[in-house]
Amino acid sequence: MSVDDSAQLKMRSSKGKPITAPDTLGSAGEQGHTSVNATSSKEADSSVSSSESESRRASKVSGWVKNSSKYAFLVVVALSFITRYWLIWDPAQVVFDEVHFGKFASYYLRREYYFDVHPPLAKMLIALGGWLIGYDGHFLFEKIGMDYMSNGVPYIMLRAWVALFGFAIPPLVYMIMAESGYSVAAATLAALLVTFDNALVTQGRLILLDNIMIYFMLAAVYSYVRFFKLRYKAFSTQWWTWLLSTGAMLGCVVSCKLVGLFTIMLVGMAVLYDLWRIIDIRRGTTMFDFCRHFVARAFALIVVPFMLYLSFFYIHFALLTHTGPGDAYHTSKFQMQLIDSPMTKSSFDIHYGDQIVFRHRDSAVYLDSNTGRYPLRYEDQRVSSQGQQVTGAKNLTSNSLWMIQPAKDQLGFQEFMARRDAGEDISDEDMDKWLVYHSDFVQLMHVNTSSILRTHDVASPLTPTNMEFTTVPLNGSVAVWEDTIWQINIDGADTNDTVLQTSSSFIRLVSKKHSVAMYTHKKKLPAWGHKHQEINGNKKPTENGNVWTIPLIHGRKASPEEQEEMKNKVAKMGFFEKYAELQGLMIKHNNALTSVHPFQSTPMSWPLLVRGISFWTNADARKQIYLLGNPVGWWLSSLSLLAYVISVVALELFNRRNITIVDGIIYRHFLRSGGFIAFAWFIHYFPFFLMGRSLFLHHYLPASIFAYMMIGATYQFFNFDEYQKFTLRHWNGKARALMPSTIAAALFATIIAAQVATFMFFAPLAYGTTSMTPEQIRGRMWMSTYDLHFQK
Amino acid sequence: MEPHNLKQRGRHGHEGEETLPFVSEEYANEQRQRAAAGPSYSLDIPITPGKSYGAYPVKKSPSWDDSGADSLTDFSSATFESGLVLGLLKSRDFVITGMLALASLVTRLWSIGRRPNVTWDEAHFGKFGAYYINHTFYHDVHPPLAKMLVSLAEVVAKHNGSFDFKSGKKYPSHVDFTLMRAQIAMYGVALVPLAYLTCLQLRISRPMAVLAACFVLFDNALCVMSRFILLDEPLLFFTAMTLWSAVSFQNVSKHGKAFSHRWWAWLLMTGFSLGCVMSSKWVGFFCVIMVGIATADDLFRKYCALMPWDEYARHWCARIIALIVVPLLVYTACFWVHFTLLYRSGTGDHKLSANFQANLRGNNLNTQPYDITYGSFVDVRAVYNGPGLLHSHTHTYPSGSRQQQVTCFPHRDTNNVWQLRKAFGAAMDYAIDPIAFVNDQDIVQLVHNQTGATIRTSENFKAPLTAGHFEIAAENITSSSEQGISNWRVEVVKQKHSGRKDKRVHAMTTVFRLRHVETGCLMRVGQRRLPQWGWNQAEVTCLPDPTKKKDIRSNDVLWYIEHNTNKRMAQDDLSKYVKSSFLIDMIQLNVEMAKTNNALWPDVNKYSTLESKPWSWPFLIHPMRMVGWGDKTIKYYEIGNPLLWWGSAIVCIAYPFRLLYLLVRMKRKCPLWRPSELLEFWDNTKFLWGGWALHYIPFFLMGRVTYIHHYLPALYFGLLQLAFELDFFFKRWRRGRYLRAAAWITGIVVCIVFLYFAPFTYGWDKSAKLLAGRKWLSSWNIYEDFYAI
């Protein structure tokens, strides 16, 4: 819905008579540009005549038709409220990802540091709701199905707060459609379809991020549409308001989830298209004008969102001041910034002869060994050394204690140990001689079995490319000796005078002879290895998976004075430094979310709604919440997208051969506004194909809203409503009221009826409030791939 | 900036609307006028010599070239009608081409046999070439054409196929590896004259065309990769052929007559080259896309130019035949030759169907008794694709009967062997009694050869995974009362060779069901895999009382005997009975190639100095060591000519911005060039830059391991693009006064850099430390090994 002068000029010349612009503002003529003046002065007559005919017609139509936009909007608001808030207190249990997002909100209220791959805004908003109603964050939402009532969580208010965003989605859809020049019928159709979508309802009434994200996304799109319509009043206050509002909303959406980047790309592409038309010399723009346009947009749509994004992180750090479960993801320096961090409590220098424990940074297992041996033959017929097992254990036991010994000066060391064991008081100076430094060569003795850690050229049990880890008795042969020597590499240390410390040193243990680093990964050994993680030698020592920490020294605890001293030594970290570290970790861990989830799905399956996600079940009451879109709506919307693409391609091909099928203005609106919607769908959907991480059906929800809008757009196009009669109203989101034809009305009624009926039919799965018999459940399996519970 | 632009616009405003020519509207109008005038659809815009077009006065016969053939302003269609294939080739061009070829020969062949060991991927491709001599079937990710060319070279070099091309091994005296390398190098040699000819077709001035050829000539990476028995040279050669013929076809179709002999010749040549390039390596498909996009562009222009429908349809048909059918035929023909040559059993047998294997000489499926008798040891395969052979092992079911598991397992294994015995009650000594054939409706028992257990099922035990089915297990049956539960009736469904009347069960050709006599259920296997305790093998169940026709006929209850062993029977040649279809084999082989290709994922735990990531290629960040790096050994380093790599990278990366700049100028009505020049620019760079982008960008999306030599096809396009841009610039700067000098200077500098890096290209047998000065980037591992900690 736009004026393209060039196209208009062309059309005029080709058809020989002027055609009314669809959205001529009365004020458009006030623009200083001559070319616009020229066109709009011609249009002045026609717009006068059209408004005359309109007033004639208006005298004939009854009042409710004139006000239908208002009524329709109210109906959408009311229905949206009912569908979202219907039995919102049920189930009174933790559902699906409430596990995460409820928990994160609690952490904000407890001010404890946590780590998550999503930016903080949506979670802070949830926490804000909790704070407003006086929730103290005592509950940690540990498992799906945990009871809210008995734990005293004000979950109804929390859900009602989050559902506000979900509730606002259908009205926003109406407003976007109305502002984009669609009739009341088309706008209502799109908004009602969104209202009665099961997936959006399910998602919209629980403590989840997606509805907040979608709310900001639609708000950004709405602002952009308003802004775009003011393009002939450039740099007016209104223009600036909507431009900045677009930028602010974009900042919010990307601060909810990084998926918001797609919305930024959508607006970005629309802006580029717009700028491309502005730079056209036939519009009379000077290069200076163009630069002003460019700078204004760059500021509002790049700088503003980024500032907002940063400021939310600023608040995030300001709120989360205490140590919490997210510590372990960060560098030691970062962790020491947090109040009560164990880093500042127990960061001791390590001396030779200390009995220490190794913990793997990423998987938090302890380097463990026990008297068990590797089996001679593995299942794939490879042979092992049959040496003592070295594994990664989840639990800390005395089997995880290793004594660190120097690889060289054995004699002096023995004497030192003897004195130490005898309980002699050793001076600090003497102790300092036995500090462990970066790049020292050491041996590690397993305390319980008195054997020494060794790696050698035997393939490890599960990973044939890596070296096996085992231990050898203390008095082993000389040939083996070289295998037992390790170099301590502290991450970030450049010089050899960095002392190895508990907690704060991130180390790699590299074999001197074989250059392999001690490594472990999530693969579990079979029963013979007690289901511990496999430990082996990684031939690429620089990899991230090779990093270990030493959480404690056996029998060493810090006195209060020592703690105070350590606290004072902490170097302060600025906001940007913290932010950069967190952002890097978010991206890294987001890409690493590849573990297979039973309900993950491929993007290919989403538009056809092949499968849903089980959110919550209650076996006793035979109730379940299963995230599933409205099949009728989803299939119809996918169909309308297909219809759109086919029509545009066909019409374009006809146009190229000078065959006109659809009137120019109708076609142009279809092409531009429809194209915007189609592109919005595309950009919120297609990038998922390129993502390596595990994906879920709810990733399609943003795109599904645009797909629903496309139903409205194609509905209007195929009814050939009177586009010439578009006028801009002053009230936000008021659509053009038209009496639809009988066929159009019947089509409208059919689609809505089908959508509502399907919604009701699947509602027990969306709300989880009704128990169903197996027959009823099987009746809802419209596709055999809907893996609902309680089929039997 | 602004007032100047406005003034300019005013000055040549009378020229009418100048929009981008490929943005059709204005172009369409013009073509409409031309359509009225005559049936020619050439795309050039007639330009009157001497007339001023904006800022650039046209001058005839610029000082840098007197031939006139290259001048943008002076090609009348007569020049092109009078012999286009060689129309541009004057006697001078023959001389130049010949000299370039000679220089190329020298650089590529210079001490080519210096390292008498198997070098780099010669270990693979030399070996594959030898397989064609031995006729043994092998499997590889690449299509066969280039490897067959390697084989041809080996045949010419009189190789008998006995050498195994083990990596790093010294060639024995009977292997004439120098001759092999020299032959393969010829494809690399041809690249240089081809670059020259392509540039002439792109209307690059002659000095710059020679320079372009020199770029190809003096690139160290292209040179070093041309000196070994590898697939890259044929691939590059066919890529260059494709570019040359596609560009030439564009010229004919713009300036010549459509559907003339020459037109057809170039079009078919393009199609043939496309077929060859994609039969060499699958990256050839990027060439197909490049030509496809250019063709779509061309056809769309014709469509918009209101070409009459019948003529338009003819254009379509011609392109479908030449650019789709012909390449597919070439591709298929290569596979046909591949299958025809490799008729002996080899390392790749198991990748293809049993039918195919039965036709390979020496494969154990090829030699086995055709008739199945009682007492035969058989491998039973499921017709349902995927699960494989009926299998059992000592592991038991964790629930249900807790007896030995019966599964399907895709690989050959001794646990797949079953003995066919007579039903319970009919005792028979299989070593002495007269031979009894197994017939339709016979009742048999299947006894596992390794464990002696017999397959049985019963209604009492449910299948572990599939609801409603019975469990099938194997059990050492002792008590005679239980023996009935292991009786199975053979129901012949199809006799592929002998027809329906034949009741006897045969190896390979008889498809049958196994119906449990007691319960009437059918032995069945589907997609489901047993969990860890069943080693993820396919679950075999018994489908109870199937009544639906769909169930009975479906593949998952059908079986056939893949291999039959019986000492008392004579071996048959199964290829008499079993036929395999060439097309199905070819498709299956392609699917397997794709699978193998996708399995080439980088191993994150392996430390590797060879792989490199696509982003590092254009700027030559990580060159590659091709051989071991000992001080005394002859070392080859795959490093390009840095000037050329960096230059072409800058030009190619800048191109989109350049295009954007041009478009903005058009939008502001102060275009840089005349429409004809712009069209020319677009039509040429869409091949050069498009070829570069299509051969480079897709690598970012690939998960498989990537090496620096994957960039070489893109580099070829990039080098020509570099020459094109130099030409474009110097033609305009002072009207071409410095063009010749620029070409000379650039050529000499490039040559010097080539010689400077030549030790890496021609082999260096001293310590790499001596070449430390050549380390221009800190990431070049000329003498340091960065991965050591």
Image (spheres, coloured by chain):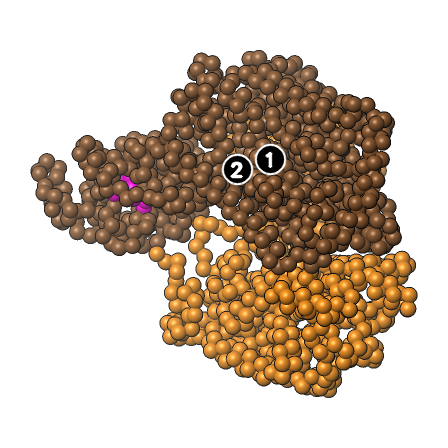
Chain colours: A brown, B orange
Give amino acid for label 1.
Ala
Q: Main secondary structure of the magenta part?
A: loop
**Horizontally, is B468 left or right of B611 in the view?**
right
Look at the numbered disc 1 and give the secondary structure of its residue. helix
**Horizontally, is B748 left or right of A512 in the view?**
right
Residue B49: name its quadrant. Answer: bottom right
Q: Which residues are magenta?
A: A501-507
Give amino acid for label 2.
Cys
Q: Position of residue A107 (x, y in %)?
A: 41, 28
Q: Position of residue B569 (x, y in %)?
A: 69, 45
The reply to whether residue A23 is in sight is yes
Quarter that holds the N terminus of chain B: bottom right
Residue, x 38% and y 51% (percent of image)? A541
Q: Is residue A472 above or below residue B518?
A: below
Q: Position of residue B92 (x, y in %)?
A: 70, 86
Look at the numbered disc 2 and give the secondary structure of its residue. helix
Confirm whether the magenta stretch covers residue B719: no
Quarter that holds the C terminus of chain B: bottom left
Give the camera-side residue of B708 and B635: B708
The residue that disc 1 covers is: A219
Q: Is residue A543 above or below residue A119?
A: below
Which mark is first along the chain, 1 or 2? 1
Residue, x 78% and y 49% (percent of image)? A41
Q: Position of residue B373 (x, y in %)?
A: 70, 38
The residue that disc 2 covers is: A252
**Horizontally, is B198 left or right of B448 in the view?**
right
